[in-house]
Amino acid sequence: MDQEIIHEAQIRPLAHAPLDHVTTFLICRNALLRTGISHILADTPFVVAAETFDNRSALPAIANETPVLVLLCESLSAHVYEDTLKKLNAQCPFARVVVLADHLEPQAVVRLCAAGLDGLCPTAMPKAALLKALELVMLGETFIPGSVSLELLKQEPRPQLGDGRVAPVPDTPEGMGKLSKREVQILHCLTQGASNKLIARELGVAEATVKVHLKRILRKLKAANRTQAAILGQRASYVC
């Protein structure tokens, strides 16, 4: 199934000590947006290169195997994104490429992942979540927003009943009504991609407390892991 591409770790070399220093190239023709992104990444491991680039052809050829990060901050059509990704991967084979954009169709995201996309981050993403997403990308994972994952799940063929009818989509994920107020708060944080440490800081509780609540959430929702729980949380938010 094509959608499986979004869950697979990339096979290219992983960054060594990714939290220490990651050379980051911005491809962005909008000077104001470029300045804003540079400000967000200031004093983080993602060190923006001094050069600014209006298009991918201006990027320097990167021959060694040290992964770098390329942030593509342009409003392009899915077709142009796909062509740009293929050319970037040919020019800089060890670069991780993340697109900062909104309103991409889920199926287009799947095609872009197949073309070499390592991450898709909405422009309104909070700074802490953005940094976590970029860290995951530099560790070799592919990141896409939970809302896109939810749309892909909704588009999957639904199982048929014995009489040939298509099974209905449940209105509310099973077990959602059993969650306590605190568990609902933690589940909401999960849908934002927050780590246990970040959730603990946000809610003013110990990280061990978050872990206990998380176990209860997984049990009540009958979820196998935090990612599945986050998707169920997104689905509940969408229904509401």
Image (cartoon, rainbow, N blue to C red):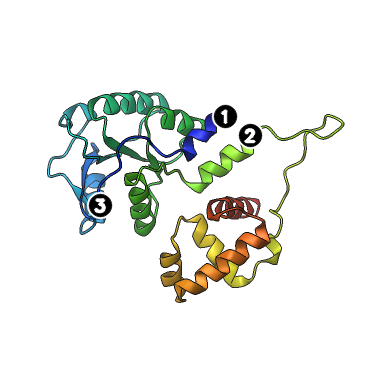
The residue indicated by pointer 2 is: 156
Disc 2 to disc 1: CB gap under 8 Å = yes
Give the amino acid type for the residue marked by disc 2 in the picture.
Answer: Glu
Q: Can residue 105 be seen at all in this image of the molecule?
A: no
Give the amino acid type for the residue marked by disc 3 in the picture.
Answer: Ala
| Rendered residue at 24%/57% (across/down) | 44
How many numbered dots are placed on residues in this image?
3
Considering the image in quadrants, where does the N terminus appear? top right
* Left or right position of 193 against 156: left
The residue indicated by pointer 3 is: 17
Q: Whole-Å distance between the Cαs marked 2 and 1?
A: 10 Å
| Rendered residue at 38%/50% (across/down) | 133
Task: Looking at this view, name the residue that lies furthest to the left.
Answer: 50
Q: Locate residue 212, reporting x and y percent.
A: 55, 70
Q: Locate residue 53, reporting x and y percent.
A: 18, 35
The residue indicated by pointer 1 is: 1
